[in-house]
Image (spheres, helix red, strand yellow):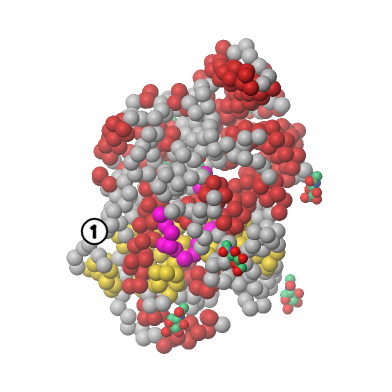
Amino acid sequence: MHFLVFLILGLLVPSTISIKVQLSTGTIEGKELNATYSPFGNQSSLVFFGIPYVEPPLGDLRFRKPRPPIPWDGILETKAYKPACMSNATKTYKNGIGGPISEDCLYANVFTNKYCMKNKNCSVMIAIHGGGFLFESASAFNPEILINNFVGQNRNIVVVSINYRVGVFGFGHLAGDQGDRNMGLFDIMAGVKWVRKEINNFGGIKDRITLAGHSAGAGLIVAFSNSPLTKGLIHQQIIMSGPLPNVSKKSNYKGFTRMAQIVKCLPEDSGFGVLSKKQVHDTYSCLREKSSQELLDAEMYVLMNTTYYFGAPHIDGQFIVDYPDRLFAAKSVFPINTLIGTTTAELRETIYITDPKNADLKEALLKNMCEHIGYEIYTEKEKFVDNCFTYYSNGTQAQFLSDDMEFYSRAISVASIHVSNNTKVYMYSYAYSGAGRAFNKYLDVPSPHHSEDLIYIFGTHRGVFAPKDYVIEQIYSGVFADFVNFEDPSPSENQKWLQYTPEKREHFVIDFDQNFTMPGMRENYYAEALKFWSGAGKKTFSEQYSPSYDTFIITNLVSPIVSHLNNVSSDVDKTLEQTEKLFFERENYLEKLKLERKFELEGKKRGNSEKWKGKKTAARMGNEIGIQERDGGAEEAGGGGGINILLIIFAGTLLGGILYVTISHFCLHHRSREGYQLLK
Ligand SMILES: *[C@@H]1O[C@H](CO)[C@@H](O)[C@H](O)[C@H]1NC(C)=O
Ligand SMILES: *[C@@H]1O[C@H](CO)[C@@H](O)[C@H](O)[C@H]1NC(C)=O
Ligand SMILES: *[C@@H]1O[C@H](CO)[C@@H](O)[C@H](O)[C@H]1NC(C)=O
Ligand SMILES: *[C@@H]1O[C@H](CO)[C@@H](O)[C@H](O)[C@H]1NC(C)=O
Ligand SMILES: *[C@@H]1O[C@H](CO)[C@@H](O)[C@H](O)[C@H]1NC(C)=O
Ligand SMILES: *[C@@H]1O[C@H](CO)[C@@H](O)[C@H](O)[C@H]1NC(C)=O
Ligand SMILES: *[C@@H]1O[C@H](CO)[C@@H](O)[C@H](O)[C@H]1NC(C)=O
Ligand SMILES: *[C@@H]1O[C@H](CO)[C@@H](O)[C@H](O)[C@H]1NC(C)=O
Ligand SMILES: *[C@@H]1O[C@H](CO)[C@@H](O)[C@H](O)[C@H]1NC(C)=O
Ligand SMILES: CC(=O)N[C@H]1CO[C@H](CO)[C@@H](O)[C@@H]1O
């Protein structure tokens, strides 16, 4: 038993260890902090909160890659969390009242203990928070939970949590921008490099670093370990319920551009076209003059009152060099030890398709979803739509479509790419649905959904724990701690956790019966989903989305539809007015793609000599129905544009789309939910 060894040695450690630590940039002074909540005992820790790991990204450094920290004289007191980065504080702190936010937010927090400080040989875990690349913060983690789960119980892990810039501050960019981009990812890399340099001062070993994250945090870790810039920086990764970031070459530029227009750093009518070098320079100069609150307010405005989004990092050619699909296919990713897994319900976004309430619409809704995916991102569109419809019309299968696509089949890709002779890959499927009041449920889908297992690891969304929850917390966090410490998450000698192989897709099922026994190993993780999605055909990578979007993500596809069906916005940020605009924009756009495709195929049939004609006709059709070329969100600078498009269409078209268009027009003004049925 590894634990026993640690325990005995732990008792021998003298209790007079200074809590001042000398770093390469100066001396810091931390404090002792003990947990106070667990029936397993109050674990004790030495903590150092708010250590500067880069120069504050203020003034001219806004929107720039981070720079090394500035040394200080004397002793820097590091006993309290620093503010979270600029974000919606209510969402970041999840306590109903918010908490401090600031642009001066790039600090690290270190949790260690006397054993590590003495022996200087502890493993290190760096926690990367989630929050959709827009909110949350290391300063919102409850320290006691990290102490109990990882530092204490003789697990002796040196835990580091870091803030990184989010929203427009962390992932903004303009079209044509050649400057610093994906600052949030560069922040994380600077944090990891800082840990490598300083962690021995806290008792950690720099070559035993595990990067751990959930959701968007996990997505950022995937982006991190896919990057050519990070080779050799970390030893292992933990990827919990992490969809790959929805990266495209331009993701995030429309929301950012709209934000710049709102604060008057770009003319209202400047659209979304590529900007000249000078325009980019001038826009950034102007944005650097504004207060951080003004930019945040504009970000919030865009999220709520326009059809645009913020979010994912983008392919910048430096940190993220290509689409993950391509990086994986080229096997250009440097493999590392990986613990990866998902919950059995995640987001279930397509559950509206099988909702008994929509029973009459089931086929139409499924076909519509398959068409959006097929026409927007696959090359053999008709084939995709047929296969998708056939596979997902079976029973209530359609509710899994979104999770199969965004979570399960992608978890398989990530796991498989890290399998090598020198690495260990482990996979889990979290199926425990008995959390009850221990989880502050925030989605109306079955348990265990996205974040539900996180209550036992980092404590986010934690509700009221019953005695059984403390036991589960100890077991489940122990799996993660053992992976960090021993490269092996097996819960016991009797229940070995076998390594994942692409052939058998071994995975450990996490569930707990009355005696807290877990089911353990199974094979063929999501076999059916894999069969479907791996045979789904080639993606186009042509970066063509409906006018308000700059990347493809199912959430953004589903929420306008569900909002429309319920006549209530289901988007956490947007008003119903905006989701309705999006709904019509997207349905229109799909009709346009189908029409173009029809002409393209007819052109093909007529033979090569006439091929160009078909294309031309398709383009002309597009123009005539009033929707600009696919990439031309530029034309609706004033926000949304859905209504204008529909009016133009209604007034202008006599072409094939007329029936659809008339219906759309009708729907818009009468908000008729029947409208959907007519889309058939
Ligand atoms: C942990 O600390 C709290 C608060 O000081 C105390 O009430 C509780 O009894 C302690 N628990 C254990 C198991 O020692
Ligand atoms: C924390 O716990 C340790 C070990 O039980 C104890 O020596 C120390 O006084 C406690 N510190 C605080 C601040 O409660
Ligand atoms: C750390 O050091 C202690 C004391 O030398 C030793 O007993 C222990 O095995 C070491 N742990 C690791 C993980 O190397
Ligand atoms: C911040 O988030 C909360 C909770 O989702 C929401 O109610 C509020 O409107 C948001 N604030 C702004 C300014 O958008
Ligand atoms: C959205 O617009 C409404 C109405 O103009 C306004 O009251 C609200 O503050 C705006 N929301 C944000 C987050 O700016
Ligand atoms: C439909 O789903 C059931 C249950 O998952 C499965 O056994 C069956 O093979 C499926 N049918 C088809 C035609 O795929
Ligand atoms: C792993 O080892 C096996 C047997 O030693 C060898 O055949 C195989 O090529 C190795 N694979 C890789 C990826 O190095
Ligand atoms: C739990 O353990 C008890 C005592 O060993 C046993 O009687 C019971 O069947 C077990 N329950 C389950 C669900 O395995
Ligand atoms: C949709 O909701 C609005 C209020 O938000 C209401 O005025 C309207 O009548 C509703 N429409 C339908 C079709 O239920
Ligand atoms: C631009 C965009 O679509 N961003 C989305 C990327 O994914 C995150 C996390 O799922 C969403 O919150 C963003 O809206």
- Side (left or right) of 93 relative to 664: left
Q: Position of residue 625 (x, y in %)?
A: 57, 17
Q: Is mark 1 within 8 Å of ligand 2?
A: no
In the image, residue 111 sits, relative to residue 547, either above or below, namely: below
- Side (left or right) of 580 relative to 76: right
Task: Please tell me which residue lies in front, 221 or 398.
Answer: 221
Task: Please tell me which residue lies in front, 254 or 17.
Answer: 254
Find the residue positioned furthest to the front: 609
The quarter in which the C terminus is drawn is top right
Q: What secondary structure is the stretch in magenta mostly built from?
A: loop
Name the quadrant containing residue 176: top left
In the image, residue 591 sits, relative to residue 200, either above or below, namely: above
Q: How crowded is the residue under tag 1: few (<14 C-alpha within 10 Å), some, or many (20+)? A: few
- Residue at image coords 57%, 12%: 652
Labels in figure, total: 1
- Residue at image coords 48%, 87%: 8
- Residue at image coords 47%, 34%: 308
Residue range of the region highlighted in magenta in the rendering: 229-246
Q: Which residue is mark 1?
A: 70
Q: Is residue 232 magenta?
A: yes
- Side (left or right) of 618 relative to 152: right
Q: Position of residue 81 (x, y in %)?
A: 35, 60
